[in-house]
Image (cartoon, rainbow, N blue to C red):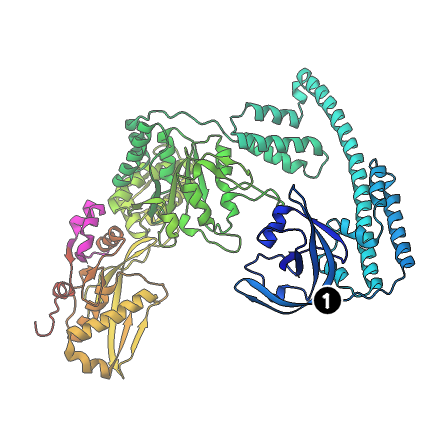
Amino acid sequence: MKTIPCYNLLMLPQQEYCFGGDYFRELVGNEVTKGEEIIFLLLKENKNKEEMTPEDIYPIGMYGAVEKVEPEGDIYVRARERVNISELVKEKGVFHFRAVSRPDIDDLTEEAKKQRFSDMQKAYIHFMKGSQWGPLVSGYLMQWDQMETMISALGSKVPISSEEKYQIMAADTSSERYERMEKALYSLLEMLKVSNEAESALTEKNEKLYREDAIRKQIEFLQRELDDMHPESITDVRRFEKLIADSAMNEAARAEACKVLNRMKQEGSNSNEYGLLYDYLDFVTGLCWKKKEGIRIDLDEAERILSEDHYGMTRVKGRVMQQIAVMSLNRKQTGSILLFVGAPGTGKTSIGQSIARALGRKYVRVSLGGVRDEAEIRGHRRTYVGAMPGRIMDGIRKCGENNPVVVLDEVDKLSHDLHGDPSSALLEVLDPEQNATFTDHYMNVPYDLSDVFFVCTANTIDTIPEPLLNRMEVIEFPGYSASEKLQIARKHLLPKAAEAAGLKNRQVNVTDEALKLLIADYTAESGVRGLKKQLDSICRAAAVRIVRGDRKSVRISERTLQQYLFDRPVRRDSRLKQAPAGVVTGLAWTRAGGEILFVETLLTPGSGKLQITGKLGDVMKESVQIALSLVKARFPETEELFKTHDLHVHVPEGAVPKDGPSAGITLTLALASLVTGKPVDPELAMTGEISLRGRVLPIGGLPEKLMAASRAGITRVLIPKDNEKDLQDVPVEVREKLRIQPVETLEEVFAAGGIGISGR
């Protein structure tokens, strides 16, 4: 006897069921012949053979036999009686069980059955009278002679669940089974009525739409005739049709634009969505879709423009010239995405304008500071109220070209929240392999960004995600020396400040000595932004005197400079005249440039506690621990000293946060000076991290640190040996003022500081 698990099958005793041959053999697993007995196990859920468990099978099944096997493959099975399934187990993928006959209780008379079936049959025939297939279907309905045959024939159409089909079969009494069958058949009848009503309503609606469409086409034809006669009164639809036809959109963009235009026609100008559709079409048709041919660039002219706009920055301008040369040879945008990193006011953003001028392209600046929503880059989907394109596509649309120079400003100040990660959206924008098909969510069609010259700027790379940083080439912007700032002020900043204040040539004259004093005492930065503000202030003060008629021109000297400034001189740390034991001068990098800082140490009677002040970060606190361990190891005779005294390490100014891996040798030398009682030369400053092995590790920001040392009157500087290669980035005038000593080990640091190690 064969066993077949079946799902969602309505089976009733003494009814015949037809199965497709292939489907049946798939269930059985082999050939079948007439007369073969079968037990149908009914499944609660549709599962494959490997997943089925005894818990998935209903406790009542159906016993039947194969009555006929057609040559075409169909198999007819007669359901005989219901059986109770018990002791069901599964072994090696095969179900074993015990099947016992389950008798039916016939509590309805034949007359009652016939009457109920007749009522049901009449209801279906009445429903089909209004249909064109009514006579044919009515004849088919008249062939049935009992309720069980009717519901078996319509079983696949009846809108009931697998559980409800099982409940019909599992009903023990005729009255319960008839009640369930009637409910199912009436549900099917109601569903057919609703379906017919919906179909009729849809047909009526479609006829109305066809009529409207025909009328619209006539109106469109007449409107086109009027537009040709009166071009000044052309409609929005006609204008966009012309713009779409004349543009060089790709196929996807043209299809989307036409789709929106058709919707705009259907909605009409009084629709609530008309404005949204208009804005979208106005945006996509305003973009430049035509790819421009590459032109050969005059390198001499490009170099002249870069030198004219920016003083110094030899390495930066050299790298830009390389990029321009490669583009000139390839006649297309190639090469790395440039990331300019440096302190504020060093010219990172403005050099993007010079690049655009050198290439003869439009300039677009996109500020990313504080952007935390991915939609700011990719745009909003048009399903949202107030949807807008992303900043990049909006900038490209406003410039009217598809190959501008785009400066992505402040990429290090991106953030992210629940609205997404904008830095991840920038990956597609900056990747040359992907940005040829960049898709803004608002546009919903690809746009080619491969011809755009992207330039990114940042103050630091520490906060830029690694995947984004890998797509860019980092170019450091070192701070300007005092002589470079003097030239920049004389050639660029002062003429612009005078022009902005409305002063003519020679109406304001600032001497070189006054400019040097302004740079040295009134600004504290690596860049020239603060210097520009001070020059603006001087020119405004000069304008007041000239307008009042006090004088026709103003000459500002070193002696009269303070009269034209509101600000007081900037307080700046300078080298100590005398340094007690335990005090050492270090060098630090800040976003405003380099600074010197003093590491102060003190021993007081106590129990060996360590106190660290000066608002130090975790990295510098760890450097203090390393320095203390190294001093204890190099000076073992101090072991008792550290047990009976508390150590206090302080780095002024206490309110300014300080952190970074470059104070290791400074802290170590300060502690060594403290425990030996030997002061360190105040004209000596240093920078470098230290390891527990006593190796001096490389640091960053060397040019800014050395400029700070020179400014503070330092004459000797210790730097890590591995940073020697970075000296080429330091201005010559700074290198000439300092005696720079590369060190590799802690012993060299102690020797340079005049401190000997015990036993050596």
Q: Amino acid at mark 1?
A: Ser
Q: Is residue 189 above or below residue 240?
A: below
Residue reaching furthest to the top: 229
* Quadrant in which residue 605 is drawn: bottom left
Image position of 581 (left or right of 91): left
Residue nearest the observer in this picture, 212 or 515: 212
Q: Is residue 594 magenta?
A: no
Residue 685 appears left or right of 304? left
In this view of the protein, can residue 205 be seen by the observer? yes
At x 33% / y 35%, what residue is drawn? 309
Q: Return the x and y of residue 455 as percentages of the image width and height.
A: 38, 40
Residue at image point 44% right, 51% down? 414
Q: Quadrant of the N terminus?
A: bottom right
Q: Position of residue 317 (x, y in %)?
A: 29, 37
- x%, y% of residue 245? 57, 24
Q: Which residues are magenta?
A: 712-740
Residue beneath label 1, please?
A: 101
**Residue at position x 32%, y 51% in the image:** 525
Image quadrant in which the C terminus is located? bottom left
